Amino acid sequence: MATELILFADYHQIHVFDEESETDLGNYWNDEAYEAGIVVADDAVGIVTSTDLDVGVSVEVLQEEPPAGDATGRIVEGELHVPSGRVVVMGCTDFLPDAARFEVGRGRHRVRVARLPLDPAADDPDIEERLRLSIWPV
């Protein structure tokens, strides 16, 4: 079952990281990262969005790798170490104490980000982009 979030993608970024991470993804962003669509540190992943406005993010915590499904455009993936067993998903300037947290289990996990088609009949016309974020153990 997926959890639906609306995140403010300030600086065209969404962050996914171990709840106890002290990694500063600001040290990882460069032109190559923006071109690749993702930055990966040991316990943190930064996802590039096409907008710096609200993004709909569907978060799936899975037990195994999912099929590619209904993604459009580029799919990006990275690996994430989660020693705490919980990941945080947030816009890069969101308030950390209020950010969404997900139990994923301790260890290494794969993170896949797929762009989804916008639904013209959606309840929130202010969403500029939709992403599906899938997380599973490796």
Image: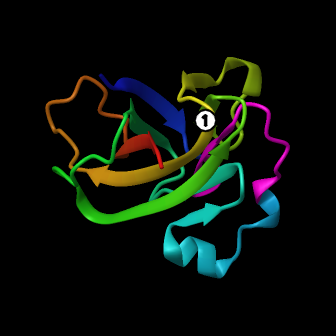
Residue at the spot x=21%, y=29% of the render?
122
Would you say 112 lies left or right of 38 here? left
Amino acid carrying label 1: it is Met
- Give the residue at mark 1: 90
Q: Where is 47 relative to 107, above or below?
A: below
Q: Which image quarter holds the N terminus?
A: top left
Q: Residue furthest bottom?
A: 32
Residue drawn where x is 21% and y is 49% of the image = 117
Side of 118 relative to 50 (left or right): left
SS class, disc 1 = strand
Residue 70 spot, x, y in % from top left: 16, 50
In the picture, measured across the screen, residue 122 lies left or right of residue 22, that is: left
Image coordinates for residue 52, horizontal then vertical, percent: 54, 51
Query: In the figure, 34 relative to 20: above or below?
Result: below
Q: Position of residue 7 (x, y in %)?
A: 52, 34
- Name the residue rendered at 75%, 19% in the picture: 97
Q: Residue at x 38, y 25 (%)?
A: 4
Q: Is residue 96 magenta?
A: no
At label 1, counting other C-alpha atoms closer than 10 Å, the crowd grade (few under 14, some 14-19, many 20 or more) is many
Segment colored magenta: 10-25
